[in-house]
């Protein structure tokens, strides 16, 4: 695999974790975490642990996961082998990333505005409390 190909491989070992690949495969099948947990006969909390890289399934469950999600066990573990397609083309990502960055900046500005309002309200409350005590 060339360096450029690896940089564009969303699910390569240095780009994604087991949990990232598991989540992507589940979403590609259109399953919710609850649905997949139910089909595997495990608790939702267990699946969430796998998706959040707090734990990994045993071999028998890994085989079941791979079969249910139509990916290879190797892909789930390493990112190599039969898996899901990358989420979007670089062009689509660029457009989506720009829109997301715009939203994040707006949220940051709103957060700053709210933080300032909270600071002023806290200051007024302290003044009121100081006067009444």
Image (tube, rainbow, N blue to C red):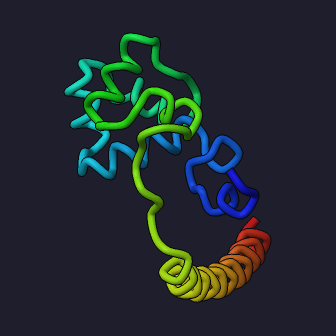
Q: Is residue 35 left or right of residue 51?
A: left
Give the quadrant of residue 117.
Answer: bottom right
Q: Is residue 84 above or below residue 63?
A: below
Q: At 53% from the left edge and 83% from the top edge, which residue is drawn?
A: 91
Q: Which residue occupies the foreground of this view, 32 or 72?
A: 72
Instruction: Estimate the x, y position of residue 71 in percent, counting from the top left.
Output: 36, 37
Image location of residue 88, percent across then percent down = 46, 70
Q: Horizontally, is 54 left or right of 132 in the view? A: left
* Above or below 4: residue 24: above
Q: Quadrant of the C terminus?
A: bottom right
Count numbered badges in the picture. 0
> At which x and y percent is residue 38?
21, 27
Q: Which image quarter: residue 85?
A: bottom left
Please state if 87 lies on the left or on the right of 41 as rendered. Answer: right
Residue furthest out toward the front:
1
Quadrant in which residue 60 is drawn: top left
In the image, residue 92 lies at what x, y percent?
48, 81
Residue at image point 33% right, 50% down: 27
Residue at 67%, 55% in the rendered image? 6
Task: Please name whichever residue, 120 or 39, is drawn nearer the observer in this view of the structure.
Answer: 39
Nearest to the observer: residue 96 or residue 81:
81
């Amino acid at each position: 695999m060339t360096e450029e190909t690896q940089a564009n491989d969303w699910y390569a070992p240095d780009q994604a974790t087991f949990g990232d690949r598991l989540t992507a495969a589940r979403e590609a099948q259109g399953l919710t975490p609850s649905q997949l947990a139910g089909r595997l006969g495990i608790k939702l909390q267990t699946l969430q642990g796998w998706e959040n890289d707090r734990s990994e399934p045993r071999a028998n469950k890994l085989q079941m996961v791979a079969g249910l999600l139509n990916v290879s066990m190797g892909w789930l573990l390493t990112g190599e082998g039969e898996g899901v397609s990358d989420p979007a083309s670089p062009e689509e990502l660029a457009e989506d990333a720009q829109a997301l960055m715009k939203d994040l900046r707006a949220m940051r500005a709103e957060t700053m505005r709210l933080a300032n309002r909270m600071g002023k309200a806290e200051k007024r409350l302290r003044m009121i409390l100081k006067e009444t005590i």
